Image (cartoon, rainbow, N blue to C red):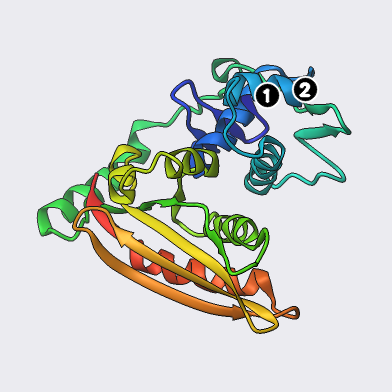
Amino acid sequence: MRFAEFEVTPAGDLLRDGAPIHLQPQPLKVLAYLVSHAGELVTRDELRRHIWGEETFVDFDQSLNWCIRRIREVLGDDASAPRFIQTVPRRGYRFIAVAAPAATVAAVTPVRRRSLRPLLATILLALLTGSFALTTTRPATVLVLPFDDLGGAAQAGTVATHELIHALAKTRVGVIDPLTAQKFKNSGECILELGRQLDAQYVLLGAVRRAGAGVRVTAQLFRVADNTQAWVGEQDLDANADLAGVYARMAGEISSKTQRSSID
């Protein structure tokens, strides 16, 4: 389905003007469901039943709010003056943009053959000289396990988890959605095995504990392929700390450690 410059494909991808955009699996499912019911009020309970299922292992309201926030960030939507998703207080959401099958709105611009000759010649020359790189940088996927609360820092682990995921979403790192991470964390399995099951290249785990008048956040990043620690970070936060700035820096360090290139 297409709307404005965006498209949600049958394969479950989000495109902007034909180019793929990264959106975590759970927010993408919510977006696809809302688009498929454009113009209709979709209640929060309906989303819970169709996206999460009857058995919900974590705080559903918090997770849905996170999904809607991520969708709005990616679409450039504003909750106070929405173009795409309208909030119906205490009830649910309504997708207000006009959505249509891609085939009904896609425009094909004819291209004269002669205009392609210089481009084809350039590509052929680059291939012959070996200067045309057939590699692209793909974002690694990180399984972010919910941070543990240690030493009386109530709810601090939940805050740290969501703040870091929010910051990572602004980098090229792919993040396994927190609902899935929470369910698997409670399974008691080895964290690296969880990463393999969810096709994640890295697993991030951390903890928050009381430190004087503030809290200390520690995090460790493990590479699934060879069971090695790729990064470790620690940060002390007080009441005046710039949380967004702190977690943005941590996300930047994690992103730099996970960059990898592969052949398409």
- Which residue is rendered at x = 56% and y = 24% of the image? 107
Disc 1 to disc 2, C-alpha distance: 6 Å
Q: Position of residue 42 (x, y in %)?
A: 76, 21
* Kind of residue at disc 2: Thr
Looking at the rendered image, the quarter that the N terminus falls into is top right
**Residue topped by disc 2:** 43
User: Closest to the observer: 33 or 186?
Assistant: 186
Seen in the picture, residue 260 relative to 96 is either above or below; the reply is below
Q: To which residue does mark 1 refer?
A: 47
Residue visible at 26% across and 53% down?
A: 224
Which quadrant holds residue 105? top right
Relative placement, left or right, of 72 versus 41 is: left
- Indicate the secondary structure of the residue bearing disc 2: strand
Q: How many marks?
A: 2
| Residue 240 percent coordinates (x, y) | 75, 80
Residue count near mark 2 (Cα–Cα under 10 Å), binned few <14, some 14–19, many ≥20: some
Q: Secondary structure at mark 1?
A: helix
Observer-nearest of 192 and 263: 192
